Image (tube, rainbow, N blue to C red):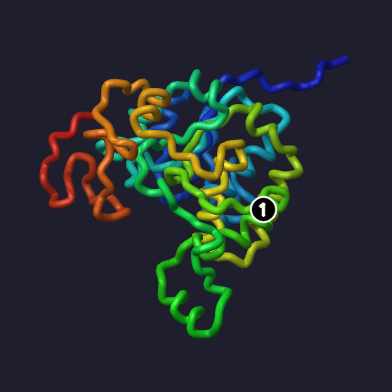
Amino acid sequence: ATPAHTTPHRETEIVLASTTREDPSWVYQYFSHWNPQVYITDDPLAPLTVPKNKGREAMVYLTYIIDHYDNLPDTVIFAHASRFQWHNDDPDYDILPTLRNFRLPYVREAGYVNLRCVWVIGCPAEIRPFEDEDPEDGDEKQREEAAKKPVSAKGVFRRAFQELLPEIPVPKLVAVSCCSQFAVTNDTIRRHSKERYVRFRNWLLDTPLEDSLSGRVMEFSWHIIFGKEAYHCPSAKECYCNVFGLCDLSCSDSSCDGRYILPPYATLPEGWPKLGWNHEDRGYIEP
């Protein structure tokens, strides 16, 4: 008899959520040993894609988990496709040194690890589900005022969380450093059944919430799904040491000197990282 086909065991795999506008070539150049899985969300004919381009990176992460649930590597790293992004926890906003320094043994110990240590944005108190105003609640004047505010997951989080995780009481406080880039072990993923991840994805597919809201709800739910407390804000010093092996930094609870400055805009300037915000030469040297 011909033996059944089995995929070779993998220690680590990296999953990227990408669009046709992004350039994920860096992951193949530097991390081919992690067997990159690059999902193109806006191309239904791509080798790896999603049922619907909805819910931002969450749709990719859930699709990967569902498709590989029975044959997961030891550790999965979930990240965005662009190498330089405002939220990457690095002085140049470069994910390359972040991943090079990343300590996989710590992930296997912790089960779930955020790729970001600095507290801004997300800690120490991003969402208070019972206090934050919900645009769909209240009288007409309250709804009008809420409609003027920037799009936020805060007002819809309580209802969405109840739909996603009805068996877990809605926490009074949710805090985790943004922005949906993390590593998780196969055992941690399998804390939940495959059917539950299908249900999470169906929620994303069916929810009337706009893309930015549903994606943000998932962004601040992953750590809870993977077994951490709703408040998950380890001290910056502890985090940089455990996660990246950077143990000699001068730190406060929320940040460490020279590691991350919140940029003035979410889009990095043209020419970054060689050119700065005022088109000045930054003296950048490729790591």
Q: Nearer the viewer, residue 45 or 127?
A: 127
**Residue 10 visible:** yes
Q: Nearer the viewer, residue 84 or 144?
A: 144
**Residue 224, how many percent across, how many down?**
59, 42
Q: Residue at x 46, y 76 (%)?
A: 147
Q: Residue furthest bottom?
A: 140
Q: Is residue 49 above or below residue 52?
A: above
Res 80 → quadrant:
top left
Pointer 1 local density, CA inside 10 Å: few below 14, some 14–19, many at least 20: many
Q: Residue furthest left?
A: 280
Horizontal side of residue 145 vs 9, given as left or right: left
- Label 1: element kind: helix
Q: Residue furthest right?
A: 1
- The quadrant of the rendering that contains the C terminus is top left
The amino acid sitting under disc 1 is: Leu
Horizontal side of residue 28 vs 15, given as left or right: left
Q: Nearer the viewer, residue 255 or 50?
A: 255
Q: Is residue 160 above or below residue 76?
A: below
- The quadrant of the rendering that contains the N terminus is top right
**Residue 85, how many percent across, how many down?**
34, 44
Please name the residue that numbered disc 1 is placed on.
164
Res 13 → quadrant:
top right
Q: Residue at x 62, y 42 (%)?
A: 225
Q: Is residue 230 above or below residue 250?
A: below
Q: Residue at x 38, y 27 (%)?
A: 238
**Residue 42 visible:** no
Q: Is residue 239 above or below residue 201?
A: above
**Residue 95, how many percent across, how many down?**
36, 35
**Residue 117, how many percent across, how many down?**
38, 36
Q: Residue at x 27, y 50 (%)?
A: 268
